[in-house]
Amino acid sequence: MSKPSSVRIEQCTQAQLKELLSLAAGQPGRNVSMPIGMADREELYRLLAELCGGEEGSGELLLTTICAEEAPVEALRGIKELAKKLSADARTEAHRNAAILVYHAAIAAAFGRHGINLSSRPIDARCSLYEDLATAFAEDPLGDVFREAADRAMNLEGIP
């Protein structure tokens, strides 16, 4: 198995991000500029369930919680921490990318819906990433999560 890259998702170009999303969806070479539909979400559910020890429904529960407007900050913080652990424990790049997506989605949900940055990095450093993810997931509730975070970050510059 090859050693994971040390490049952070926040530093990816738009083309690299599109490739990353297609890898996370388990469909290398797919043009991610097309809306990612529910079939891709099912693949994400599968990858996350595998990361969570094969617990059926675990991936769906993580994403449903992140996308729920009423999700409390502490639940999102817990998901963020779990995603960090899942990313570190991932055995394949697709699994790692799925965990990283959940990590960013939890941070975006907390910021977009509650105005709280769960990361030590300034949220404005992720604004373009969230814009790209909002576009890539435009037809999915995850797109709304990233859109809300990107919009709030653009409207409230200088948030730590």
Image (cartoon, grey):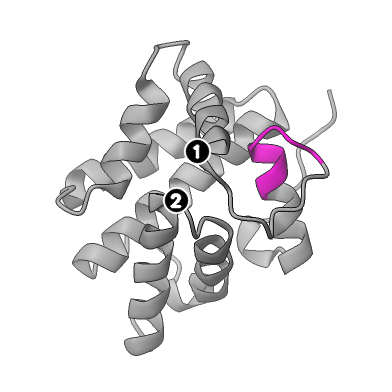
Counting every numbered tag in the picture gives 2
155 is within the stretch colored magenta? no
Q: Which mark is residue 52?
A: none
Q: Residue 156, relative to residue 90: is it above or below?
A: below
Which residue is more in the foreground, 145 or 88? Answer: 145
Horizontal arrangement in the rendering, residue 79 relative to residue 13 (left or right): left
Query: The C terminus is located in which quarter?
Result: bottom left
Instruction: Name the image quarter holding residue 88.
Output: top right
Residue under the point 53% across and 17% down? 50
Pointers 1 and 2 in contact (CB under 8 A)?
A: yes
Q: Name the residue under label 2.
A: 140
Instruction: Name the image quarter holding residue 122.
Output: bottom left
Q: Between disc 1 and disc 2, whose residue precedes?
A: 1
- Mark 1 element type: helix
Horizontal arrangement in the rendering, residue 27 relative to residue 156 (left or right): right
Instruction: Name the image quarter holding residue 3.
Output: top right
Q: Residue 38 carries which label?
A: 1
Residue 131 at x, y = what percent? 53, 71
